[in-house]
Image (tube, rainbow, N blue to C red):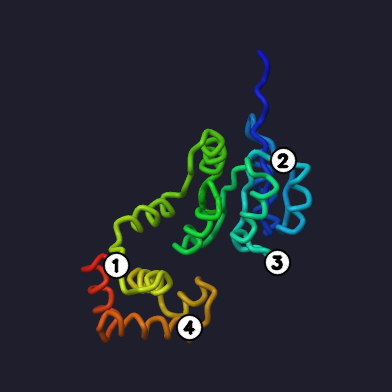
Amino acid sequence: MENKSPITVAIIEDDETIRNGFTYLINATENYKVLNSYSNVEDALIGLVNDKPQVILLDIELPGIKGIEAIPKIKHILPKTYIIMLTVYDNEDNVFNALTKGASGYLTKSDNTEKIIDAIQEVVNGGAPMSMNIAKIVIKSFHKNQNSPLTKRETEILEQIANGKSRSKIAKQMFIDLETVKSHIKNIYVKLNVHSREDAIKEAKNNKYI
């Protein structure tokens, strides 16, 4: 019986250990083949023209051109290639930016190898693979009150506060400075007419803003 052609994959990931690990594990799985791997988008855009992979695993936080910025550039040269985002951070802005720009799936790097292999197969079959926590973000967004006075960024910060994150942790995770976080929190209090984080969380949850 003739072997079916393997699903071809390219990886764009700046962490050499992760890049090599994924390459090894995918190549070690029957009917999967990594054609090439890149540490940045700039090199990938040159090489992918010849690689023509069916699926690309694309890191979000990259040097130079970021992962989300890269999606339309990759889609321009390879419109039929599926892109699965890989990230450490699962914040709502990143998820929706990636999906609206044309990503077909979204996984966190903590997912096990089987999940990543399954996601590659799923995306080729027309699915939209997502980590459990990513899927929750997407579903939760549909249940939110669309008339919230809070901006997307303010909502995200308030959700992080509700999850017990400190201001400095939020700043680090969202790649903004501490003063910006404080400014957003001040705006949240004004808009919700509250004076404490507890009241802000309570008001937002009662009105389904978060």
Q: Which residue is mark 2?
A: 52
Kindly identify the residue that appears in the image at 55 percent across and 55 percent down. 101
| Foreground: disc 3 or disc 1 | 1
Determine which of the numbered discs, if any, sits on residue 170 in the image: none
Q: Residues within 10 Å of mark 3 (few under 14, many from 20)?
A: few
Q: Mark 3 touching mark 1, by CB under 8 A?
A: no
Q: Report the amino acid beneath label 1.
A: Asn
Q: Which residue is mark 4?
A: 180
Residue 94 screen position, x and y as percent: 51, 62
Q: CA distance from mark 4 to mark 2?
A: 42 Å
Q: Which residue is mark 3?
A: 64
Q: Earlier in the sequence, mark 3 or mark 1?
A: 3
Q: CA distance from mark 1 to mark 2?
A: 44 Å
Q: Residues within 10 Å of mark 2 (few under 14, many from 20)?
A: some
Q: CA distance from mark 3 to mark 1?
A: 37 Å
Q: Report the amino acid beneath label 2.
A: Lys
| Foreground: disc 4 or disc 1 | 1
Q: Report the amino acid beneath label 4.
A: Thr
Q: Secondary structure at mark 4?
A: helix
Q: Tell me the quarter of the image containing the C terminus.
A: bottom left
Q: Residues within 10 Å of mark 1 (few under 14, many from 20)?
A: few
- Depth check: give the residue in front, 133 or 18: 133
Residue 114 screen position, x and y as percent: 53, 40
Q: Mark 4 touching mark 3, by CB under 8 A?
A: no
Q: Mark 4 touching mark 1, by CB under 8 A?
A: no
Q: Earlier in the sequence, mark 1 or mark 2?
A: 2
Tell me which corner region of the image, top left, top right, bottom left or bottom right, holds residue 157.
Answer: bottom left
Determine which of the numbered discs, if any, sits on residue 147 in the image: 1
